[in-house]
Image (cartoon, rainbow, N blue to C red):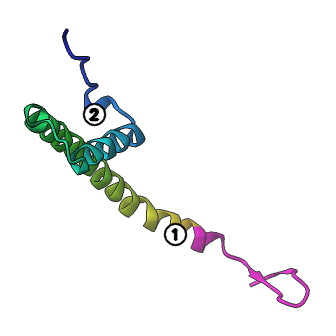
Amino acid sequence: MPKAQKPDPAKMTYADASEELDEIVEYFEDADIDVDQLVEQLTRATALVDELEKRLTATKLQVDELAPRLAQVADAAQVSIDPETGEVLDD
């Protein structure tokens, strides 16, 4: 009976890929590891780790790019407020 084809890690959600990786880790923590599946599981885990790392790196780059722009907008929107009355002060 043929095995079900696993989805391409690039087409999985981050959460699904991470969950599958956790399942593989649990498999390796089991004392009864099937030697015949060892390489298959390691290969799949490597593909999942590569994809998750790629996404984290891309997300970090986006955050690094967007954070300064967001800080500029926040600085530009700042107004002075009277701490006693809560009224907006004219600068």
Task: Identify the amino acid type marked 1.
Answer: Gln
Q: Which of the image's four quarters has the N terminus?
A: top left
Q: Looking at the picture, tell me which residue is in the foreground, 70 or 36.
A: 36
Q: Are the two marked residues, 1 and 2, in contact with CB atoms closer than 8 angstroms?
A: no
Give the quarter of the image for residue 88.
bottom right
Q: Earlier in the sequence, mark 1 or mark 2?
A: 2
Give the quarter of the image for residue 45.
top left
Q: Residue at x 36, y 53 (%)?
A: 59
At which x and y percent is residue 23?
32, 42
Q: Residue furthest bottom?
A: 84
Is 39 on the left or on the right of 45, as rendered?
left
Does 77 appear above or below 1?
A: below
Q: Which circle, 1 or 2, is nearer the viewer?
A: 2
What span is in magenta?
74-91
Q: Residue at x 26, y 17 (%)?
A: 4
Residue at label 2?
10
> In the rendering, which numbered label is found on residue 72?
1
Task: Identify the amino acid type marked 2.
Answer: Ala
Give the quarter of the image for residue 27.
top left
Does 34 appear above or below 18?
A: above
Q: Residue furthest front?
A: 32
Q: CA distance from mark 1 to mark 2?
A: 34 Å
At which x and y percent is residue 73?
56, 65
Give yes or no for residue 18 being in the magenta stretch. no
Is 38 on the left or on the right of 77, as rendered?
left
Q: Residue at x 34, y 58 (%)?
A: 60
Q: Residue at x 83, y 87 (%)?
A: 82
Q: Secondary structure at mark 1?
A: helix
Q: Secondary structure at mark 2?
A: helix
At which x and y percent is residue 64?
36, 63
Q: Which of the image's four quarters has the C terminus?
A: bottom right
Task: For label 2, count other residues whose C-alpha is less than 10 Å away and answer few (under 14), some (14-19) or many (20+).
Answer: some
